[in-house]
């Protein structure tokens, strides 16, 4: 896992995350939140502005009602009639004064209170003597006899206002006969004598609550809404939809949302300062949240598409960047394993292509340098090898020819002829242009050589040879064993005064868990003590030749040559070759392949 943290692809992914993914994700969250906040604020401002407009319309309407309650002050006859009524002398007055009083209140006042607005249903004037004067859109509307007008709340509110306007909450017109049975709200005022400040009468103008519906219905919001108007005591004046008492109470508390029929509504409130009423708009929180969710949905949709497109582009570009480097690493591994023919396939002319071309050029130059050095070293080692091999032939022929001289002097011509034929086969084998042979061929050569030597020694020399059949094809440098057999016969057997036996064998053994081939040539000749006492035996040309050829052929770590000797007992020469060669274990010439092992 840690190795992947240092790869170029991982670093590109980190760069992609820092420069693209994280900013895009932040934008995807911040922008919808920003627009949500902005939309909420704008909706709040628009709603408040709409409420203010509605409040002004209601205030304008209340102003009309308030002006109606001021009408009696504009006519002197009406004011005199009210003053006369307040003296409670009406019943004892003469007919003329009664006529003037009744004409002012029954004819002049209704003419002044006439209103073309159908939503203003009528006015009610109650002088302090308890009489009732009605001006209503229904001509046959009459006051109810024996109705305690002066005990009503609205009457008391007008007196409490002491000449100022009193806004009466929604109520029924239960104080008139034959009047329209509608829910109304009213404006009442106590009429006082401007001079004496004495109470003269209470006037009240009734307005249909439908006018509030008319004002509210002209305005719409982009979500489901409920408009609620409450008086100064938080009593319901108007509601565009039925609303429970609990919901009304929720409007006045500090909670952000109001529960109406199990659904949450956000509230926006505006006061009507003139009447100390308040108008509240309840906006559906669910629909508002739905619009915000739609905003987030669209934002995340574009965010997902953008991330997908950028991620695909990232994969495409990163693959075009990373894959060439992977191919370069693969080529380098092949070169490290010895394949100098591996090349990087360059495409384009960018920096990666230039790097690939430089890698290919480096491999070509490395291959040329290795080939040049290898050929030089190989030519040198082949020259040394052939020089060592050439040392065998004169030395060997010298010894054989000396043996023939002895046979010729002894007159053994038949034996000499047989020896010449054996020698011709040996020379044919040794003069072949091959530097490598097999154990089978080497042992056959040793057999012929031994036969030639046995001709000299008669029964004094016996040679026994054996090798494991599976080793017959194992490759050896040609004429590697002949100097050992020659050294054994000349220095071990020839000086002895008894019959000598030479045993030559090749077998498979193990050393330190490694399979090896062990070739030994032993005799029961005179033996020797040490190298210092017998330097001509252990350091002669033949044995030194064997050591150097083993070193050249197999390397110092894969072949070993040992001599063990005991005076009067005999000598054993051993060659040990490992069957697990390293890169320098085997050498070949131009005509032979690498040695085979079995």
Image (tube, rainbow, N blue to C red):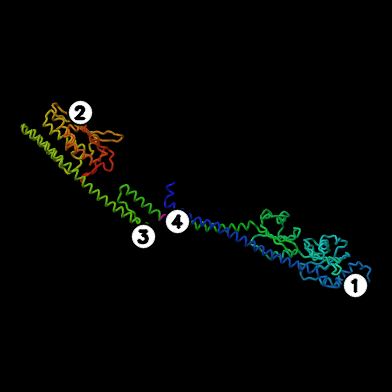
Q: Where is residue 445 in the image (x, y as percent from the top left)?
A: 16, 36
Residue 191 badge: none
Categorize mark 4 by other alpha carbons within 10 Å: few (<14), some (14-19), many (20+).
some
Earlier along the polypeptide chain: callout 3 or callout 2?
3
The residue lying toward the viewer, choosing from 103 and 29, is: 29
* Depicted 542 relative to depicted 256: above or below: above
* Depicted 272 relative to depicted 368: above or below: below
Q: Helix, strand or loop at disc 1? A: helix
Report the Cα–Cα distance between label 4 and label 2.
81 Å
Residue under label 1, please give it: 99
Give the overall secondary structure of the magenta segment. helix
Q: Helix, strand or loop at disc 3? A: loop
Residue 314 badge: 4
Categorize mark 3 by other alpha carbons within 10 Å: few (<14), some (14-19), many (20+).
few
Earlier along the polypeptide chain: callout 2 or callout 1?
1
Q: Give the range drawn in magenta.
A: 312-320
Residue under label 2, please give it: 566
Residue under label 3, please give it: 349
Q: Position of residue 483 (x, y in %)?
A: 17, 36
Earlier along the polypeptide chain: callout 1 or callout 3?
1
Mark 2 or 1: in front is 2
Asked if the stretch drawn in magenta spans residue 318, the answer is: yes
């Amino acid at each position: 896992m840690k190795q992947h943290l240092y790869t170029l692809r991982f670093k590109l992914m980190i760069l992609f995350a820092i420069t693209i993914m994280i900013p895009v994700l932040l934008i995807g969250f911040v922008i919808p939140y920003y627009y949500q906040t902005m939309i909420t604020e704008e909706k709040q401002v628009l709603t408040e502005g709409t409420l203010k407009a509605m409040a002004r319309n209601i205030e304008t309407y209340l102003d009309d009602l308030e002006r109606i309650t001021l009408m009696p002050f504009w006519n002197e006859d009406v004011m005199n009639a009210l003053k006369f009524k307040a003296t409670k002398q009406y019943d004892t007055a003469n007919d003329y004064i009664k006529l003037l009083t009744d004409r002012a209140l029954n004819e002049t006042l209704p003419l002044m209170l006439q209103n073309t607005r159908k939503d203003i249903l009528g006015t009610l004037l109650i002088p302090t003597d308890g009489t009732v004067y009605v001006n209503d859109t229904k001509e046959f509307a009459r006051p109810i006899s024996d109705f305690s007008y002066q005990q009503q709340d609205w009457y008391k509110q007008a007196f409490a206002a002491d000449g100022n306007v009193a806004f009466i909450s929604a109520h029924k017109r239960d104080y008139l006969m034959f009047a329209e049975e509608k829910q109304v709200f009213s404006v009442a005022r106590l009429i006082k004598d401007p001079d004496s400040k004495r109470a003269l009468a209470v006037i009240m103008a009734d307005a249909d609550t439908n006018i509030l519906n008319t004002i509210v219905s002209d305005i719409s919001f982009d979500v489901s809404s409920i408009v609620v108007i409450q008086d100064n005591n938080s009593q319901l004046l108007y509601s565009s939809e039925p609303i429970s008492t609990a919901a009304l109470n929720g409007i006045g508390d500090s909670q952000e949302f109001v529960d109406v029929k199990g659904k949450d509504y956000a509230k926006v409130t505006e006061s009507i300062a003139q009447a100390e009423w308040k108008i509240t708009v309840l906006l559906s929180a669910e629909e508002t949240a739905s619009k915000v969710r739609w905003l987030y949905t669209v934002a995340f949709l574009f965010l997902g598409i953008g991330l997908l497109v950028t991620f695909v582009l990232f994969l495409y570009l990163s693959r075009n960047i990373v894959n060439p480097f992977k191919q370069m690493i693969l080529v380098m591994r092949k070169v490290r394993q010895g394949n100098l023919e591996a090349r990087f396939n360059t495409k384009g002319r960018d920096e990666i292509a230039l790097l690939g071309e430089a890698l290919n050029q480096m491999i070509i130059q490395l291959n040329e340098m290795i080939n040049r050095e290898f050929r030089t070293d190989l030519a040198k080692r082949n020259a040394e090898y052939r020089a060592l091999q050439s040392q065998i032939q004169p030395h060997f022929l010298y010894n054989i020819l000396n043996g023939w001289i002895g046979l010729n002097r002894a007159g053994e011509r038949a034996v000499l002829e047989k020896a010449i034929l054996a020698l011709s086969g040996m020379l044919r084998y040794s003069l072949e242009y091959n530097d490598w042979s097999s154990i089978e061929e080497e042992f056959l050569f040793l057999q012929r050589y031994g036969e030639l030597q046995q001709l000299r020694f008669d029964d004094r020399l016996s040679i026994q040879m054996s090798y494991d059949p599976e080793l017959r094809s194992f490759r050896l440098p040609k004429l590697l064993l002949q100097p050992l057999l020659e050294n054994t016969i000349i220095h071990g057997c020839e000086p002895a005064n008894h019959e000598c036996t030479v045993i030559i064998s090749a077998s498979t053994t193990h050393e330190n868990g490694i399979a090896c081939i062990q070739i030994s040539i032993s005799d029961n000749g005179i033996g020797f003590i040490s190298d210092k006492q017998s330097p001509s035996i252990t350091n002669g040309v033949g044995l030194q030749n064997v050591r150097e050829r083993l070193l050249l052929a197999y390397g110092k770590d894969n072949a070993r040559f040992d001599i063990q000797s005991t005076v009067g007992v005999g000598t054993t020469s051993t060659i040990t070759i490992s069957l697990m060669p390293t890169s320098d274990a085997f050498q070949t010439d131009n005509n032979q392949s690498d040695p085979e092992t079995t």
